[in-house]
Image (spheres, rainbow, N blue to C red):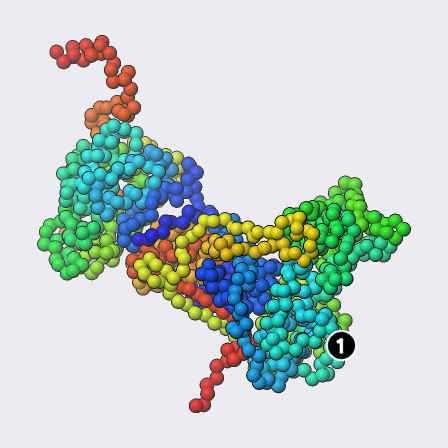
Amino acid sequence: MKNTDIAAPDYFHKVIDCQWACPAHTPVPEYIRLIAARRYSDAYMINWWSNVFPGILGRTCDRPCEPACRRMRVETEPVAICRLKRVAADYKDDIRARLPKPAARKNGRRIALVGGGPASLTVARDLAPLGYHCVIFDQDPQAGGMIRTQIPKFRLPDSVIDEECGYILDLGVEFRGGQRIDSMKALLAEGWDAVFVGCGAPRGRDLDIPGRREAAAHIHIGIDWLSSISFGHVNAIGRRVVVLGGGNTAMDCCRSARRLGGEEVHVVVRSGFDEMKASPWEKEDAMHEGIPIHNYLVPKHFTHDNGRLTGVTFEKVKAEYDSRGRRRLVPSGEPDQHFPCDDVLVAIGQENAFPWIERDIGIEFDQWGMPKVDPRTMASTHPKVFFGGDAAFGPKNIIWAVAHGHEAAISIDKLLNGEDINDRPAPAVEMISQKMGIHEWSYKNEVVLDQRYKVPLRDKVVALKDIKAEVELGFDETLAFQEAGRCLNCDVQTVFTSSLCIECDACVDICPMDCITFTQNGDEAELRGRLNAPATNLSQDLYVQDGLKTGRVMVKDEDVCLHCGLCAERCPTGAWDMQKFLLEMTYAGNSCRPQRRSAA
Amino acid sequence: MTYLAKPKFHHPALPKNALGYTHRDYEGAVSTLCAGCGHDSITAAIIQACFELAIEPHRVAKISGIGCSSKTPTYMLGNSHGFNSVHGRMPSILTGANLANRDLIYLGISGDGDSASIGLGQFAHCLRRGVNMVYIVENNGVYGLTKGQFSATADRGSKSKRGFINTDNSIDLVAMALQLGASFVARSFSGDKQQLVPIIKAAIAHRGAAFIDVISPCVAFNNHVGSTKSFDFVREHNEAVNRLDFISTRMPIEISYEPGTVEIVEQHDGSKLALRKLAADYDVHDRTAALGFLQQHAAKGQIVTGLLYVEKDAKDLHAHLRTVDKPLNALDEKDLCPGEKALEAINASLR
């Protein structure tokens, strides 16, 4: 294998599994260390710069970082990254003085943002301080989009939404609530310098089976029903409720129903329990509240009596796999199952809808009715129009909307400065040795064996009585400190310098995970098989360095390295060093411009 | 060294031996020796050898004297018997233990100070008697604990870290072991586990006095230019006479060798040593030739390593003394007091 190029930002970035997995590439270990040091405001600001909504995401994020966490591979449960983010938000001081100021002078450019959700707010956050005049249009009176309308208040209180949306609107962003955009053509005709579409995936999929029309009064589309609760239009539901669907919306629906009078709430899904789209923790939360989840049941028809819903009949199915491993649901032959109920909530998916974008104005759509969007630049086929969030590629989650927003902001900033939007800025990277003494490091390198700590919950009886009572109480400072200690500091990298190595094997002997091998070079597949411990996780790189006196190479399998630094402590010559790799994404503004020589 | 204990986490795909243990289960306390010490590599090699042989930890007794080397039994085999004895007296403690309980595997861990200076007499008599043991000398040529004076194995003409030239002749423990009748003699290098681990395994399987001299650079006081025990010097002057594969009785012999390149030596327990010759005409069973070979190469400044001598039908102290098969510490009153008739018979035989 060739020598690993550790100067390429991606190499060590990939080693920080959580940061690499985060769509917004939040420097997770960096803020977890700050939480352990009780520097909550500093931890909050790191989050704020990269994911814009730390308090909101700390309660609602889909957490792509956690399944990626190295702790999963060396123990069983990941670090509770998401809930630690909430700790930073809960315990910070007033950070308003640390936020950017509204631009002292506008630059004369006007940006229209359609939809007031996380994607548009991120674009506005990045662009407004630079002097752009950002105007957000939303049909609802307040900013937040689906964050405000679809996430139940027992998961995310309004106060958190108000605070974090407020930070953005206070940057001099104009919010035109209650103003729905009905025509893109008309909007473009108003002469905006750029238009960003962040209107989400606002249409809940319906279930057109017999009885749907007759029993319509008691069959509700999940996301519409949730927003009706949010606006106070709905405050009760029948005693017996069936929720159709297995995603996170279904989980929000069943838990909301439990709080509005639903005593017998059942979730019914077509496929298997394990294949449900809902995050495991959301399923756990629902089951904790006494909501059973039934699987392998396909809805056949709604039963009704004189226009009144009486229940849902399901066909029992089983999963069959063809030779290519594709799954099919086939009838199991067992008798149909009937669930008597008073109300049904349909939460079987969301769709995009762009009836307001005319098809003859240069914005191309694909065969599925989705706009053609460049995933790097978020540009549509119209030079001035950009998409982000669920509006771009269909329903995802908040953290993806934020990531899209950052990219779109860069594109808009470049476009309006006459630059090529395809020329993307590199991230900012710094590496600093953590060595303080012979065996002292400026990070806590002792590996803690603790299991994941549970977040304290509000008493169930109390929680189920009030739909606005937040269920999760969040970690207290002690629990937060203990949970933060579980982080393995994957951003503190093992950096090897061949010219200093005397091949004494001390690092090989001390490494608790058998990550390091000194051996003859070979090609990757062959080399992976003959390391001290087999390197079978192909998603994790091998760190290879030649230049040793014996002609061998040092090979380190990054897969299960604990970043404990024992290799560096045992190294007599300093050939191993522990260096903190801090990668921060570049956002819109001067730093994303190519450096130009000035004449002076 | 490190203040931290090695984390308990281990690689999820770590192989297990026949007993269900991983090599991590053969570790001891974390080492307090200097970072990079060759002794720690030898510790790791012993751990690896015991893991690969699937030795039950309670069947091992590790006995040492005083010195850096003699600290190392603490860092391995945390579930085995151990005795950190008096300076240079490991051989007599071990001999006594071995006489009392012949069923254990005896690892005598010593250093060049412990064996070539204060314990030279003990070293000699223990090998001469053929005590069934593995005698490992972790040989770095200096007194590390007292800041790097020349030890008795430092070569004449080699230079100390402070620049002094050694004017004394050195003791070659390998040559002495050959002369004293050790039935298994090897030399290896802490920086070459591929060579060292099979040698330790073969030595453990050997019945009789097995002596291994392991050159183990002292990174603090003897790893500089001018030293003959530094990593660089040993790597440059290493003359391995053979490469050893140890084939235990459990393993089916499937490895095929080119005819004529490998000599198979069977040991008393049925295990086999497959020796790939590197030096032409080197006979691993010829004690006197081995001595000559060693001296010729030493004169050229070369360090001969590998399995240097193995006796085909080695016998140990218990065989010489014709002791009973049952360990002496397990003999009960019935065995020890056979009764009046037996005493009379003995007395009669002496009349």
- In this orientation, which residue lies closer to the viewer: B251 or A598? A598
Residue B312 position, x and y percent, is 25, 34
When asked about the image quadrant of residue B235, the answer is bottom left
Residue extending farthest to the left is: B167
Residue at position x 34%, y 43% from top?
A: B28
- In this orientation, which residue lies closer to the viewer: B137 or A462? A462
Which residue is labeled 1 in the image? Answer: A183
Residue at position x 43%, y 54% from top?
A: A562
Residue at position x 18%, y 54% from top?
A: B148
Residue extending farthest to the bottom is: A600
Residue at position x 62%, y 71% from top?
A: A166
Q: Residues within 10 Å of mark 1 (few under 14, many from 20)?
A: some
Q: Can residue B83 be seen in this view?
A: yes
Q: Can residue A505 be seen in this view?
A: no
Side of A282 where A78 appears, left or right: left
- In this orientation, which residue lies closer to the viewer: A380 or A401? A401
Quarter of the C terminus of chain A within the rendering: bottom left
Side of A4 where A212 appears, left or right: right
Tell which subunit mark 1 falls on.
Answer: A
Amino acid marked by disc 1: Ser
Residue B330 position, x and y percent, is 29, 24
Residue A369 position, x and y percent, is 73, 68
Query: Is A447 drawn above or below residue A97 in the view shown?
Result: above
Side of B59 where B108 appears, left or right: left
